[in-house]
C-alpha cells in the first residue's frame, strides 16, 4: 500500500506589531503611506499612524511634503504632539506653521502642554505684536513663568532654563519634603534631584531622590543634602553653561539669580542642543557662512549673507597679487617660480588651518585662557618649525630632482620653513586676538590667517628667489 502524503499546512507566520512596523518604515514608505491615507481620507488610521511615530520623524516627514499636505497632517495632531513636532522642525517651516496656520488660541493650547522653557522658545519665533494676544489665552500661572523666561537674553542660562523644578526648605523634615515632592511632581515630569533652599528661597544644595526616600521621616533635610551641584548664575552665557555640564558631568543644574535665589533648572538635553548649535555655527562661520543659514534658507538671504565675506576675501586676494607684482621681474627671469608659488601658499594655508581649528575649539571649550596662551603659542610655533623642516626638506629634494638646481630646492625649503612657522603663529594669535576684542574667532579667523600665509609665503619665496638670482645662484 502506497503511503499517503500528509498535507500539513505550515504554521502562520507571526505578524509584527503594528507600532514596530510603523516606526521601522523607510522614509519613502512613510511618505507614500501617509499620502495614501490622506488622499483616501482615512483620518482615524492616519492619526493612529502618526501617533506611533516619534515627533522628530513626523517633523522630518513634514519638511519633505508639500506645504498644503503638511498643513493638513499637522492639524490632525493633538496640541501636545504639535508642540513636540514644532521643536523638531526646520526654523523657517516652524515660523510659517506658527504664523500662517495656527490662530493665537491654537498656539496657546500648544504652550499649555509644553514645559515653560519649550513654550518660551516657541514664542521667540513669533512677532512680538502677536505674543501678547497668545499669552492672553494662557492660564495666569503658566503666563507668569513664560513671561519671566522671555525677559532673559536668549543665549543665557535664563533663556535655557525651565521653571518646573522641585524645591524644599532645608529646615523641613524628610516626611514633609516627600509630601511636597508629591504635590510638585505634577508640574515636573523629570525629577533628577530635589533642590534645597532656605526660608528666603536661596539655593543651598540638593538631595538625591533615593537618599530622600530612604532617610528617616523625622530627619531634617539639611542633614542629608549635598552641595556638589554648582549653581549657575542666570545671565551665564550658554557656552559656559555647556562647559559646566561637560566638565562636571551634570545631568541637571540649578539656576540662581543675583541674590542667590533658585529661579530654574537646566537639564542635559537642553545643553546637548546648545552644543550642536554652537558647533554648527562655528563650522559654518569658519567657512564664511552665517551660523543661522540652513539648507531651506531663502536663496537671496543666503547669497547676501555670503557675499560680504567673499568681498573681504577678494580684497585680501588683491593684497597677495600686489606682493606677487613686486617680483614680476624675478618671475620673468625664472618662470618656474610661478609654478612653485602655489605649493608654498597652499602648505601655509593648510598648516594655519590646523592650528586655527585647534585654538578655536579650545577657546570654545574654555581650555585656552590668558594664562596658557603663551605656552600654546610656543607649542604651535615649535610644531610649525618641525613640520617646516620636514616638509621643506622633502619639497626641496623633489624640486632639486625635477630641475637639477640645488639652489632652487634650497629657496623653496627656506620659504616653506618660514611660512609654516608663520602659519602656526597666525593660526594661534588671530583667534586669540579676535576673542580679546569680543569678535567670534570662528567668523574672521580663516580669511585673516589665509591672508597671512599667502602674503608672507609669497614674500618669503620670491624674496629668497630674488636674492639667489641676484647672486647668480639660479
Image (cartoon, grey):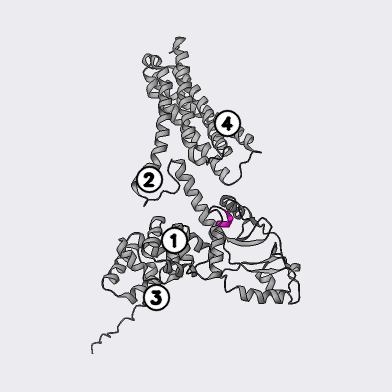
Give the CA distance from mark 1 to mark 3.
44 Å
Quarter of the image with the N terminus in it: bottom left
**Circle 2 is placed at which residue position?**
302
**Circle 3 is placed at which residue position?**
17
**Mark toward the viewer: 2 or 3:** 2
Q: Which segment did they paint magenta?
A: 152-159
**Circle 1 is placed at which residue position?**
130
**Mark toward the viewer: 2 or 1:** 1
- Looking at marks 2 and 4 on the same chain, the residue that comes earlier in the sequence is marked by 2
Tell me if residue 404 comes above or below residue 146 in the rendering: above
Give the CA distance from mark 4 to mark 3.
62 Å
Label 4: element kind = helix
Tell me the tag on residue 159.
none
- Looking at marks 4 and 1 on the same chain, the residue that comes earlier in the sequence is marked by 1
- Looking at marks 1 and 3 on the same chain, the residue that comes earlier in the sequence is marked by 3
Q: Specify whether residue 308 is painted magenta.
A: no
Give the crowd class for mark 3: few <14, some 14-19, many >=20 residues within 10 Å. few
Residue occupying image coordinates x 63% and y 62%: 263
Q: Is 6 in front, or is 442?
A: 442
Tell me the tag on residue 381.
4
The number of callouts visible is 4
Amino acid at each position: 500500500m502506497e503511503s499517503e502524503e500528509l498535507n500539513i499546512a505550515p504554521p502562520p507566520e507571526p505578524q509584527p506589531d503594528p507600532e514596530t512596523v510603523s516606526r521601522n518604515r523607510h522614509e519613502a514608505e512613510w511618505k507614500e503611506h501617509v499620502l495614501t491615507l490622506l488622499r483616501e481620507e482615512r483620518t482615524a488610521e492616519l492619526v493612529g499612524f502618526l501617533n506611533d511615530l516619534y515627533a522628530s520623524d513626523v517633523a522630518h516627514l513634514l519638511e519633505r511634503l508639500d506645504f498644503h499636505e503638511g498643513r493638513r497632517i499637522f492639524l490632525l495632531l493633538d496640541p501636545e504632539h504639535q508642540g513636540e513636532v514644532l521643536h523638531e522642525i526646520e526654523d523657517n517651516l516652524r515660523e510659517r506653521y506658527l504664523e500662517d496656520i495656527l490662530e493665537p488660541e491654537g498656539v496657546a493650547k500648544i504652550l499649555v502642554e509644553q514645559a515653560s522653557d519649550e513654550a518660551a522658545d516657541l514664542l521667540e519665533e513669533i512677532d512680538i505684536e502677536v505674543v501678547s494676544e497668545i499669552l492672553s489665552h494662557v492660564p495666569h500661572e503658566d503666563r507668569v513663568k513664560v513671561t519671566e523666561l522671555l525677559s532673559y537674553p536668549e543665549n543665557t542660562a535664563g533663556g535655557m532654563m525651565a521653571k518646573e523644578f522641585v524645591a524644599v526648605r532645608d529646615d523641613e523634615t524628610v516626611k514633609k519634603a516627600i509630601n511636597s515632592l508629591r504635590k510638585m511632581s505634577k508640574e515636573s515630569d523629570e525629577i533628577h534631584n530635589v533642590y534645597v533652599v532656605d526660608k528666603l528661597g536661596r539655593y543651598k544644595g540638593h538631595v538625591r531622590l533615593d537618599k530622600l526616600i530612604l532617610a528617616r521621616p523625622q530627619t531634617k533635610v539639611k542633614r542629608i543634602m549635598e552641595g556638589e551641584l554648582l549653581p549657575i548664575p542666570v545671565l551665564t552665557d550658554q557656552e559656559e553653561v555647556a562647559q559646566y555640564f561637560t566638565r562636571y558631568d551634570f545631568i541637571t543644574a540649578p539656576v540662581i539669580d543675583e541674590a542667590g535665589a533658585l529661579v530654574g533648572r537646566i537639564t542635559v538635553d537642553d545643553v546637548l542642543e546648545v552644543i550642536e548649535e554652537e558647533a554648527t555655527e562655528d563650522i559654518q562661520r569658519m567657512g564664511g557662512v552665517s551660523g543661522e543659514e540652513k539648507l531651506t534658507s531663502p536663496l537671496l538671504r543666503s547669497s547676501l549673507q555670503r557675499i560680504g565675506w567673499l568681498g573681504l576675501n577678494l580684497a585680501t586676494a588683491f593684497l597677495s597679487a600686489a606682493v606677487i607684482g613686486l617680483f614680476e621681474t624675478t618671475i620673468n627671469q625664472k618662470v618656474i617660480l610661478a609654478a612653485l608659488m602655489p605649493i608654498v601658499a597652499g602648505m601655509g594655508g593648510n598648516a594655519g588651518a590646523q592650528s586655527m581649528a585647534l585654538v578655536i575649539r579650545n577657546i570654545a571649550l574654555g581650555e585656552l585662557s590668558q594664562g596658557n596662551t603663551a605656552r600654546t603659542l610656543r607649542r604651535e610655533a615649535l610644531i610649525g618649525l618641525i613640520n617646516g623642516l620636514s616638509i621643506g626638506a622633502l619639497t626641496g629634494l623633489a624640486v632639486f630632482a625635477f630641475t637639477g638646481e640645488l639652489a632652487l630646492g634650497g629657496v623653496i625649503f627656506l620659504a616653506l620653513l618660514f611660512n609654516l612657522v608663520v602659519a602656526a603663529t597666525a593660526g594661534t594669535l588671530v583667534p586669540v586676538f579676535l576673542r580679546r576684542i569680543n569678535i567670534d574667532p570662528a567668523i574672521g579667523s580663516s580669511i585673516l590667517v589665509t591672508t597671512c600665509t599667502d602674503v608672507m609665503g609669497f614674500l618669503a619665496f620670491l624674496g629668497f628667489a630674488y636674492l639667489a638670482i641676484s647672486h647668480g645662484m639660479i
